[in-house]
Image (tube, helix red, strand yellow):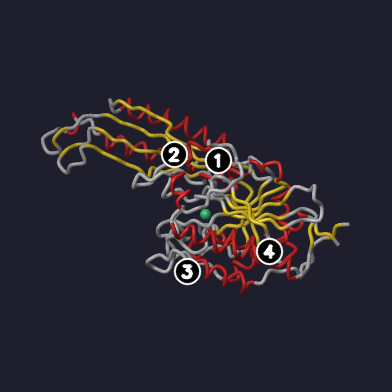
């Protein structure tokens, strides 16, 4: 027989907070945050602490060949696939104490809470730490969850090198966290996956909501544009005779803004990478190279924005007598999270009386890859001023509590409490 979780089922917010602060002592930053980059000694130390905590909570730890960690609390049905929950313990070089860590330790806290209350679930529960989510030391981001989900091969990931030329695979061996398990071997054991994460954006705080129910992950498209005009003297070239690639770029960037705004409110577009050459004060730019970044939760919108950039960019270049080239240099498709799991998150917030709203994740997360493997959803909680990837990243204990409570309820609902 299974039962529903009561609204009095809550995590211990002080214990969760203390664990967050304890983990933050490992790989401290220079301004109150963290520098616990992937596969460094500090990462190894953080992993050991997490493992110790999990084993103290009665879990068994499995590690795969790319360092992903899986702490398992058995269910009552030995045949039932497990409900997974987690995020990442690695940080940016000037990272915060909560990005990723909240999702891992929120998972641990829910297991501690179930232990305290002697609650059994039919499905096992597994708390995960995915290796190298941040992608700063070894690009790209979400590397090991991507290998797990079959997006990348393991060899390709292990050959990634950091700025000093050190290989991912060698550094994994060096810190001693290459496990035995084949990567992705446990895919069939995944009943669902839930990831709690700070928003890393300003919406929830501005709307005064405790919980973001994440329905979609934004897709992304990068198009590199090269405009070629003619370098000439800024003083002696008459205006009608100029072929100013910088000006063409400016006109195209106005279009980028217009195109994104035409798909309001969810689409966004900008060029964050811009190069003009020769980049000299008294030379009209002969060449401009820039990358247009378009994002939207809808694939059709992304495709429309890409097509319009090419069409309208071409028209601008033609009118100005310039050459233009477009090259798609990166991207990934939008993610639609599983309806049942999303509903479990929304129902949990409702039952617990936390204010909530549906939200789209603007950043990439491990959950975006794991969504390809099993039904997946995310819980978001606010962060102060939307600030993240910054040592000043901050959340309140109440926000952490609300996020972990909702995670707990969504997970036990899916793992089925045994009465
Ligand atoms: Zn993160």
Q: CA distance from mark 3 to mark 4?
A: 22 Å
Q: CA distance from mark 4 to mark 1?
A: 27 Å
Q: Are marks 3 and 1 in contact (CB under 8 Å)?
A: no
Q: Residues within 10 Å of mark 3 (few under 14, many from 20)?
A: some
Residue located beneath label 3 in the image: 25
| Residue 97 image position (x, y, % from top left) | 49, 64
Residue located beneath label 2 in the image: 159
Q: Are marks 2 and 3 in contact (CB under 8 Å)?
A: no
Residue located beneath label 1 in the image: 147
Query: Which residue is at the far left?
Result: 236
- The mark that comes first in sequence, 3 or 4, is 3
- Please indicate, yes or no, whether residue 358 appears anywhere in the rendered image: no
Q: CA distance from mark 3 to mark 1?
A: 30 Å
* Circle nearer the viewer, 4 or 1: 1
Nearer to us in this view, 404 or 305: 404
Q: Is mark 4 within 8 Å of ligand 1?
A: no
Identify the residue at horizontal 81%, vertical 52% (top origin). 77
Query: Which residue is at the far bottom?
Result: 14
Q: CA distance from mark 2 to mark 4?
A: 36 Å
Q: Is mark 1 within 8 Å of ligand 1?
A: no
Nearer to us in this view, 368 or 207: 368
The image quadrant that residue 234 belongs to is top left
* Circle nearer the viewer, 2 or 1: 2
Residue located beneath label 4 in the image: 110
Q: Are marks 4 and 1 in contact (CB under 8 Å)?
A: no
Q: Secondary structure at mark 1?
A: helix
Identify the residue at horizontal 71%, vertical 45% (top origin). 189
């Amino acid at each position: 027989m299974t039962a529903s979780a009561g609204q009095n089922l809550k995590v211990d917010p002080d214990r969760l907070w203390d664990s967050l602060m304890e983990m933050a002592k490992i790989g401290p930053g220079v301004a109150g945050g963290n520098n616990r980059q992937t596969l460094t000694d500090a990462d190894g130390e953080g992993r050991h602490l997490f493992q110790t905590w999990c084993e103290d909570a009665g879990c068994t730890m499995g590690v795969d060949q790319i360092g992903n960690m899986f702490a398992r609390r058995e269910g009552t049905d030995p045949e039932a696939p497990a409900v997974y929950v987690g995020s990442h313990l690695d940080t940016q070089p000037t990272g915060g104490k909560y990005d990723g860590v909240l999702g891992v330790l929120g998972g641990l806290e829910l297991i501690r809470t179930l232990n305290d209350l002697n609650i059994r679930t039919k499905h096992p529960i597994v708390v995960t730490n995915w290796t190298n989510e941040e992608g700063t030391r070894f690009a790209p981001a979400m590397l090991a969850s991507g290998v797990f989900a079959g997006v990348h091969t393991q060899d390709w990931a292990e050959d990634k090198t950091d700025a000093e030329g050190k290989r991912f695979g060698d550094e994994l061996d060096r810190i001693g966290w290459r496990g035995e398990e084949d990567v992705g071997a446990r895919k069939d054991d995944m009943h669902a996956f839930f990831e709690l994460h700070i928003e890393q954006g300003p919406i929830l705080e501005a709307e005064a909501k405790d919980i973001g129910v994440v329905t979609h992950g934004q897709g992304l498209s990068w198009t590199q544009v090269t405009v070629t005009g003619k370098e000439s003297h800024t003083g002696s070239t008459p205006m009608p005779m100029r072929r100013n690639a910088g000006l063409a770029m400016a006109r195209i960037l106005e279009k980028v803004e217009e195109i994104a705004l035409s798909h309001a409110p969810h689409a966004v577009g900008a060029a964050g990478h811009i190069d003009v050459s020769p980049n000299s004060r008294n030379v009209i730019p002969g060449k401009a190279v820039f990358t247009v970044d378009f994002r939207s939760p809808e694939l059709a919108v992304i495709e429309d924005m890409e097509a319009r950039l090419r069409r309208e960019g071409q028209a601008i270049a033609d009118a100005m007598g310039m050459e233009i080239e477009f090259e798609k240099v990166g991207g990934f498709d939008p993610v639609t999270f599983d309806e049942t799991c999303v509903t479990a998150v929304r129902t949990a917030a409702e039952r617990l009386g936390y204010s909530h709203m549906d939200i789209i994740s603007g950043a990439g997360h491990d959950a975006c890859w794991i969504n390809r493997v099993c039904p997946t959803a995310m819980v978001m909680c606010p962060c102060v001023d939307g600030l993240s990837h910054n040592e000043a990243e901050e959340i309140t204990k109440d926000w952490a509590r609300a996020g972990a409570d909702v995670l707990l309820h969504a997970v036990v609902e899916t793992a089925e409490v045994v009465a």
